[in-house]
Amino acid sequence: MGHRSLTLPDGAQRIAVLIMQTGLLLLLLYTLVTVRLGLALGVAFGLGVTLLPALVRHEYGYSMDPLLALWVTLSISIHTFGSLGPYDWFSWYDSVAHTVSAVVIASIGYVILRTFEEHSPEIDVPGEFRAVFIVVFVLAAGVFWELLEFASGALARSLGAEAPLAVKGVDDIVTDLVFNTLGALIVAAFGTGYLGGLVSFARRRLLED
């Protein structure tokens, strides 16, 4: 059974991506009209990230798996729209956001590992250690993010401004890391089959450079 049988049709995935991108664009216009420039900058950055698959297709002729493009856009949308209130309204929202984002980060880690593994015959990582690498990569990224939240909060306080990233205490950090690990395990167990094309593309780019 191919992995595509477990997903939505490609056309439906592309429509879902377009709908979320449209929502981000409308949110960007709203933040500009209401002069919420800090939020506008974050929305603009997120929208730009969702456009990367189209840019890669235009510049290099590589079409990313629609599910990957959908998941990246979903991750950006959840975090961006969460900043409007859902993070504060729903106790479970932050956990969902971290799990979804961890899947994206885990995918990046796996692609990096497999790209260098295929590029160099000297690198040969057993399958079980790839799963360990994915989890460690995501946890490292999670710790870096928590440090970034703390640093941004300290800088904002010193400037008398509102912190762009919320710091909610040790319990929140532990919960975030738990759900980051969950996202990493999802990729390690079920997601690597979707990443073969991206690994091949990254390896070709590495060889060309």
Image: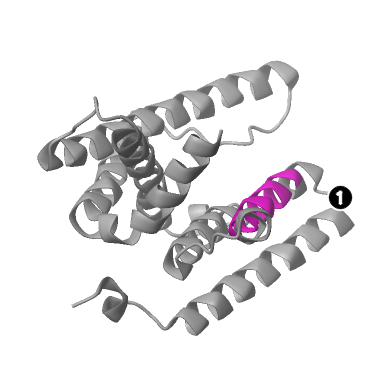
Q: Using the image, determine if residue 65 lies above or below residue 56.
A: below
Residue at the spot of label 1:
35
Left or right position of 59 against 53: right
The quadrant of the picture occupied by the N terminus is bottom left
Q: Using the image, determine if residue 14 lies above or below residue 42.
A: below
Magenta stretch holds residue 150:
no
Residue 131: % across, % down: 19, 42
- Whether residue 94 appears in this view of the structure is no
Check disc 1 and give the amino acid type. Answer: Val
Q: Using the image, determine if residue 5 lies above or below residue 51.
A: below
Residue 134: % across, % down: 27, 39
The quadrant of the picture occupied by the C terminus is top right
Q: Majority secondary structure of the magenta segment?
A: helix
- Work out whether residue 55 or residue 30 is closer to the camera in this orientation and state it: 55
For residue 172, which quarter of the picture? top left
Magenta stretch holds residue 52:
yes
Q: How is the image coloured?
A: one colour
Residue 204: % across, % down: 47, 44
- Whether residue 18 appears in this view of the structure is yes
User: Magenta segment range?
Assistant: 41-53
Q: What element carries label 1?
A: loop
Left or right position of 116 against 88: left
Dot 1, crowdedness within 10 Å: few (<14), some or many (≥20)?
A: few
- Work out whether residue 10 or residue 22 is closer to the camera in this orientation and state it: 10
Q: Using the image, determine if residue 158 lies above or below residue 15.
A: above
- Work out whether residue 65 or residue 28 is closer to the camera in this orientation and state it: 65
Residue 192: % across, % down: 27, 54
State the residue at coordinates (61%, 60%): 57
For residue 194, which quarter of the picture? bottom left
What is the tally of numbered marks visible in this picture? Answer: 1
State the residue at coordinates (43%, 26%): 144
